[in-house]
Image (spheres, rainbow, N blue to C red):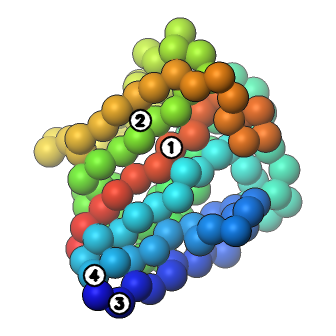
Amino acid sequence: MEKEVVYSTEAPKPIGPYSQAVWAGDTLFVSGQIALDPASGELIQGNIETETKAVLNNVKAILDKAGIGFSNIVKTSIFLKNMDDFAAVNAVYASCFTSDFPARETVQVSKLPKDVNVEISVIAIR
């Protein structure tokens, strides 16, 4: 099976030795996204809703570059610094989906890259 790297200039540049996303056959693996501004590389800060919207905008930019959308997502992983933010993150997340929701886990972690509050990765199919 061949792999194909997906890179969008509308999403933040990777901050380490990884790709924004990789196609493996008809499956797209999108690396964890945080609330980085794609143009400046600076953190987008504010409240958890603002951060989550920025994260999902970055995911969308990568999906767009790959020629697919949120309806193609089959699995989502959400990492939170504070599980007390679950309801707020869930409300923003829900705005991206209308039906046939992807499988998902949400876990609290002790620390995330750049000390952000939320990171989201997805797996999607063509």
Q: Is residue 97 at least partly visible in the picture?
A: yes
Q: Residues within 10 Å of mark 3 (few under 14, many from 20)?
A: few
35 above or below 28? Answer: above
Looking at the rendered structure, the secondary structure element under dot 4 is: loop
Q: Residue at x 82, y 57 (%)?
A: 41
Examine the rendering and report whether any part of residue 56 can be seen.
no
Q: Nearer the viewer, residue 39 or 124?
A: 124
Label drawn at residue 25: 4
Q: Point out the tag, 1 or 3, that comes first from the N-terminus.
A: 3
Marks 1 and 2, how far apart at CA:
10 Å
Q: Which residue is mark 1?
A: 120
Whether the residues at callouts 4 and 3 have beta carbons within 8 Å, the answer is yes
Give the labeled residue for mark 3. 2
| Dot 3 amino acid type | Glu
Q: Residue at x 53, y 65 (%)?
A: 61
From the viewer's perspective, is 59 left or right of 10?
A: left
Question: Considering only order in the chain, which callout, 2 or 1, is on the residue closer to the N terminus?
Answer: 2
Q: Residue furthest left?
A: 100
> Does the residue at mark 1 contact the one at mark 2 (Cβ under 8 Å)?
yes
Q: Which mark is residue 38?
A: none
Alpha carbons under labels 2 and 4: distance apart = 27 Å
Q: Nearer the viewer, residue 65 or 75?
A: 75
Q: Residue at x 34, y 32 (%)?
A: 105
* Circle 2 residue: 93
- Badge 1 marks a residue whose secondary structure is strand
| Residue type of the residue flagged with mark 2 | Tyr
